[in-house]
Amino acid sequence: MIRKSLIYKTGVEYGDYTLNHVQGCAHGCVYPCYAFMMAKRFGKVKTYEEWCRPQIVENALELLDKELPRYRDRIQKLHLCFTTDPFMYGFPEIAEMSLEILRRANAQGVLCSVLTKGILPPELADLPMQNEYGITLVSLDEGFTQRYEPHAAPIAERLDALRVLHERGCPTWVSIEPYPTPNMIEQDLAEILEAVAFTDNIIFGRLHYNKIVSEYKQHQQFYNACAHQVMAFCQDHGIRCHIKDGTLVEKEED
């Protein structure tokens, strides 16, 4: 597939500029996936099956070379990616293009951030140390992730790859979003936090667009408690923390 542009300003609250050099995502997340919902709504894909067959943007590198000089003075961090996965599990051709995008951006003085449910390659440690590398992790239960992230990388492999980069001095981060309610899975948030205690930054967010959440009558109290737990953990461990909008909602006292 061919596109007319690549880099754009994102509306994601913790984002800056971003690009998505692949349409679709083979991980097939069913939380549901907001990116899939929007792609279907605007006619980019017709079915879930089509979404799970990723298509590389053939002219992505050409567009990148054209647009980087225009945007580089505005970009704080160029993010890969918000509507696809730059290191999609089982797709080495996508990973190689992502690495090339990072190399070209860095060569233009543009720093990058990465988020994946795949495997972060160790070659990332050879790039500028100001880049940031993250994984999504909402559970340590492989059975749960196989149901909701059916084709994403195994949890242990995601964590191991992140730890390798951390040990080589790279800034690392973890997105604990969308975090499931107890009627989806009974789990201990403290165990997840301990598993990622080595990282530099944690983003925590609730699950949206799923009726199972609304069926859990105490969902807002649950997310409030979880948000406070994450904030306290991060403060105790010297980790940066961001709680996504709409996750922590507490009534003001009279």
Image: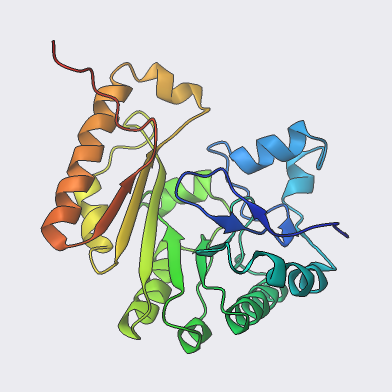
Image-based side of 38 in relation to 233, left or right: right
Quadrant including the N terminus: bottom right
Q: Please tell me how many numbered marks the rendered image carries.
A: 0
Image-based side of 170 in relation to 126, left or right: left
- Residue that extends furthest to the top in the rendered view of this protein: 254
Residue 3 vs 66, above or below: the answer is above
Residue 189 vs 165, above or below: the answer is above
Which x, y percent locates residue 240? 26, 58
Quarter of the rendering containing residue 159: bottom left
Q: Which residue is drawn at 62% across and 69% down?
A: 72
Q: Is residue 140 visible?
A: no
Image-based side of 147 in relation to 138, left or right: right
The colour scheme used to paint the residues is: rainbow
Which x, y percent locates residue 225? 20, 33
Q: Which residue is drawn at 85% across and 57% down?
A: 3
Quarter of the rendering containing residue 204: top left
Quadrant including the C terminus: top left
Residue 151 vs 94, above or below: the answer is above
Q: Can residue 192 be seen in this view?
A: yes
Image-based side of 47 in relation to 232, left or right: right
Q: Residue at x 81, y 42 (%)?
A: 44
Which x, y percent locates residue 203? 36, 50
Which x, y percent locates residue 36? 67, 41
- Residue that extends furthest to the right in the rendered view of this protein: 2
Q: Residue at x 40, y 54 (%)?
A: 137
Quarter of the rendering containing residue 217: top left
Residue 168 vs 4, above or below: the answer is below
- Residue that extends furthest to the bottom in the rendered view of this protein: 126
